[in-house]
Amino acid sequence: MAREQGRKLIAQNRKARHDYSIEDVFEAGMVLTGTEVKSLRAGRATLTDGYASVDDGEIWMRGVHIPEYDLGTWTNHEPRRARKLLLKKDEIRRIMKATKESGLTLIPLSMYFNDGYAKVEIALARGRKSYDKRHAIAERESKREASKAIGRASKGLRD
C-alpha cells in the first residue's frame, strides 16, 4: 500500500483560540496504540477538554477523547487515557520554563496526520478574561468592516 502524503485533519479545537491568547505553537508526535490509530483514521477524536502537562521532564496530553475502535477486541484502548507527546529536548525545556514561570498552559489546537504520522499541534496559551474576549471580537469585526470598505472603494462602489 502506498504511503499517505500531505496533511489530513482529524480534529480541531476551535474554542481554544477564543478562550486563550496563543503565545507559541509546537508540533508533537503522539505515542498511540493500534486501535487508537484506527479510530483516528476514521476521523473520530475530541480535543475540547484536552490539555497537556509536564511530568518528570516528559509532556503528557490528558483529557483528549479518542473513542474505542468499533471493530476492536479485548485489546481496545481506554478513550481518555494520558498520551505521551514526542518533542525535542530543547522544546520540552522551553515549555517547562514557560509553564513554571509565566503561568502559561498547554492546550491542543488540532490533531492531524502528516505524511501518515499522527501529530498534534499544542500551544502555550494564556487564558483570556471575558472582557478580553469581547475586545478581540470587536477588533475582529472592525477589521472585517474595514476590509469590506476598502474592497468596495477599490471597485468604485459607494454605500
Image (cartoon, rainbow, N blue to C red):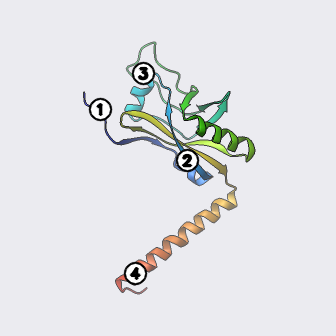
Q: Secondary structure at mark 1?
A: loop
Label 4: which residue?
A: 152
Query: Of callouts 3 and 2, which one flags the residue occurring earlier in the amino acid sequence?
Result: 2
C-alpha separation, residue under disc 2 versus residue under disc 1: 27 Å
The residue under label 2 is which amino acid type? Val
Which of discs 3 and 4 lies nearer the camera? The answer is: 3
Q: Residue furthest front?
A: 90
- Number of residues whose C-alpha sits closer than 10 Å to that of mark 4, classed few (under 14), some (14–19) or many (20 or more): few
Label 4 – label 2 distance at C-alpha: 36 Å
Query: Along the line of sight, which residue is nearer the eye, 52 or 96?
Result: 96
Q: Residue at x 52, y 49 (%)?
A: 14
**Number of other residues with Cα within 10 Å of mark 2, as a class: few under 14, some 14 to 19, many 20 or more:** some
> Which residue is tagged 3?
34
Callout 3 crowding tier (Cα within 10 Å): few <14, some 14–19, many ≥20: few
- Mark found first going from the N terminus, 4 or 2: 2
Label 2 vs 1, first from the N-terminus: 1
Q: How far is disc 3 from disc 2 in space, using C-alphas?
A: 27 Å
Q: Earlier in the sequence, mark 1 or mark 4?
A: 1
Give the label on residue 25, or none. 2
- The answer to whether mark 3 and mark 4 are in CB contact below 8 A is no
Residue 5 at what x, y percent from top left? 31, 39
Mark 4 or 2: the one toward you: 2
Relative placement, left or right, of 16 versus 119 is right
State the CA–CA distance, disc 3 to disc 4: 53 Å
Quadrant of the drawing holding the N terminus? top left
Counting residues from the start of the chain, the first of labels 3 and 4 encountered is: 3
- Vertical side of 140 occupied by 97: above or below: above
The residue labelled by disc 1 is 3
